Amino acid sequence: MKKEHGQVTGLIWRGADDLVTYQKLRTYAAAHELSVAAAAKQIIKQTLDALER
């Protein structure tokens, strides 16, 4: 498989706590009509931007 520049392989979700977090992310993504990957990227960007303030 050839990766594109900037492509991330993804997150590994293991255990009950990770599953709960993934389910919350999936629910957020659905509510905002985003893919799970796009939702994760959006949340990470918003969080990092808030930390810079």
Image (cartoon, rainbow, N blue to C red):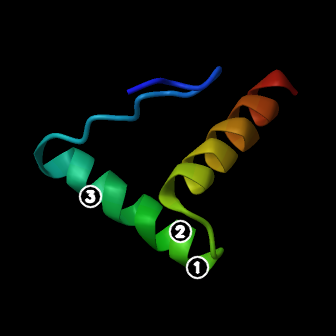
Going 55% across and 47% down the picture, which residue do you hit? Answer: 40
Q: Which residue is situated farthest in the front direction here?
A: 1
Amino acid carrying label 2: it is: Tyr
Q: Quadrant of residue 46?
A: top right
Task: Say which residue label 2 marks.
Answer: 28
Whether tag 2 and tag 1 are in contact, CB under 8 A, the answer is yes
CA gap, disc 3 and disc 1: 17 Å
Give the image location of residue 2, x and y in percent.
46, 24
Going 53% across and 68% down the picture, which residue do you hit? Answer: 28
Q: Quadrant of the N terminus?
A: top left
Up the image or down, 21 lies above or below 2; here it is: below
Amino acid carrying label 3: it is: Val
Give the image location of residue 32, x and y in percent.
65, 74
Task: Count how many numbered circles sit on residues in the image.
Answer: 3
Other-residue count near label 1 (Cα within 10 Å), few / some / many at <14 / 14–19 / ≥20: few
Give the image location of residue 41, x and y in percent.
63, 43
Task: Say which residue label 1 marks.
Answer: 31
Whether tag 3 and tag 1 are in contact, CB under 8 A, the answer is no
Q: Quadrant of residue 50?
A: top right
Q: Secondary structure at mark 2?
A: helix
Q: Secondary structure at mark 3?
A: helix
Task: Say which residue label 3 marks.
Answer: 20
Give the image location of residue 42, x and y in percent.
68, 48
Other-residue count near label 2 (Cα within 10 Å), few / some / many at <14 / 14–19 / ≥20: some
Q: Is residue 18 left or right of residue 14?
A: right
Q: Earlier in the sequence, mark 3 or mark 1?
A: 3
Q: Earlier in the sequence, mark 2 or mark 3?
A: 3
Q: Quadrant of residue 33?
A: bottom right
CA gap, disc 2 and disc 3: 12 Å
Other-residue count near label 3 (Cα within 10 Å), few / some / many at <14 / 14–19 / ≥20: few
